[in-house]
Image (spheres, helix red, strand yellow):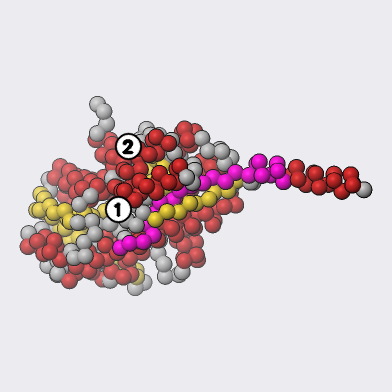
Amino acid sequence: MRIRHFVPAFIAAMALSCAMALAQTVKVGLINTWSGPLAAAGEQIERGTKLYMKLHEKDLPTGVSIELVKRDDTGPNPEVAKRLAQELITRDKVQLLTGVIWTPNALAMAPLVTEAKVPFIIMNAGTAMITTKSPYIARVSFTLWQSSWPLGSWAAKNGLKNVYTLVSDFGPGIDAETAFTKGFTTAGGTIAGAVRMPVTTPDFVPFLQRAKDAKPDAVFVFVPAAKEATAFMKAFGDLGLRSAGIKLIGPGDVTTDEELPGMGDVALGTITMHHYSAAGDRPANKAFVAAFKAEFGAKEEPSFLAADSYDGMAAIFAVVIAQNGKIDPDKTMELLKGWKYDSPRGPIMIDPETRDIVQNEYLRRVDKVNGQLQNTEIETIPMVKDPWKELNKAK
Ligand code: PHB
């Protein structure tokens, strides 16, 4: 009797412990901005990661799961990001790090991920040199050089002679200004004035007034995507730059898709260069936008931050699946180098040499289609590598 009961119980216990031994939970630290004045951008990252997880959890090998350990950096606060990354590495024992909207935060984390050998997949921070700061960094988002440099030569070749640059005074803004200026002046354009603005400014009016007084053909702008972009656009309209015939151009952060409905007609005609538009006419994008709306609401548009974080999760899934849930840091970096994906933004690849993203750049114009504003893609520059790295290659 006893033995008859014992045997099945023993087998069941063995089966359970085998399953537990096989079960692998990969812990991924997601550092994102969930609070503070810039949290709207963080919501896009949250949505992109959540959507990918929901649609693709079934693709993980049996017994393998991914746990996102979420931490709030509250904005561009490098000290906070550094502390959170330290805690995620030492206390929570995460095997991968991801997220990070802000360049100063990514830079503060770079020495930690090198020291601890924790692969760090950047979902936004776009200053070109970030990826040179650690061999454990790979970037799925963009660099400002990818958009602003080609926009500079496009502007000079398309009738703009004098352009006034206005950028947020930190890494991505300075990259945008430098890249645009190089592309524009090399092609014969003249910079009418160049002003750097505080990263979170409640009031763009004084900066735009000075720009208007300089009477340029266009203002080139970089401000962080989401609410800052809308505040800038409103001030551009209120001060009458559009009606004075001054065009607005820049990387796509200023016409971020999810904010277009709230910006109103002042955004019409804005020309931007960017790697993603919710209006992009690609099967992978149509499917992504439909899934995004099904999950978050028919009126919601995904921005580049949602697309990039969706792709970031695709990269994470790829390395987890390839290693069957057993993450080796160096193997992970090797897998990321050359990783390719049919993204909503078009084909993407991680450059095996630089660990930075290679992707299409789209010249876009804000149009009204069926009563709704959208970033219409009007030209494509295929598979752009980060020009800053190309220009600064060791001779
Ligand atoms: C960055 O900090 O690199 C950054 C932040 C917001 C953007 C783009 C880049 O819209």
Q: Are marks 1 and 2 in contact (CB under 8 Å)?
A: no
Task: Check residue 147 for magenta coloring.
Answer: no
Q: Which of the pair 325/88 is nearer the observer? A: 88
Left or right: 205 as drawn, with respect to 251: left
Give the mark nearest the N terminus, 1 or 2: 1
Q: Is mark 1 within 8 Å of ligand 1?
A: yes
Residue 74 coordinates in the image, percent (x, y): 34, 57
Residue 7 shows in this picture: yes
Q: Residues within 10 Å of mark 2 (few under 14, many from 20)?
A: some
Q: Secondary structure at mark 1?
A: loop
Q: From the image, which quarter does the C terminus lie in? A: top left
Left or right: 364 as drawn, with respect to 209: right
Residue 39 coordinates in the image, percent (x, y): 35, 61
Q: Label 1 vs label 2: CA separation?
A: 18 Å
Q: From the image, tell me which residue sits under label 1.
A: 76
Residue 383 coordinates in the image, percent (x, y): 36, 43
Task: Check residue 21 for magenta coloring.
Answer: yes
Task: Identify the residue shown where x is 53% and y is 42%.
Answer: 320
Residue 67: numbered disc: none
Task: Identify the residue shown where x is 43% and y is 58%.
Answer: 46
Task: Identify the residue shown where x is 31% and y is 48%.
Answer: 79
Q: Nearer the viewer, mark 1 or mark 2?
A: 1
Quarter of the figure with residue 388: top left
Q: Is mark 2 within 8 Å of ligand 1?
A: no
Residue 133: numbered disc: 2
Residue 228 coordinates in the image, percent (x, y): 26, 62
Start-end of magenta stretch: 16-37
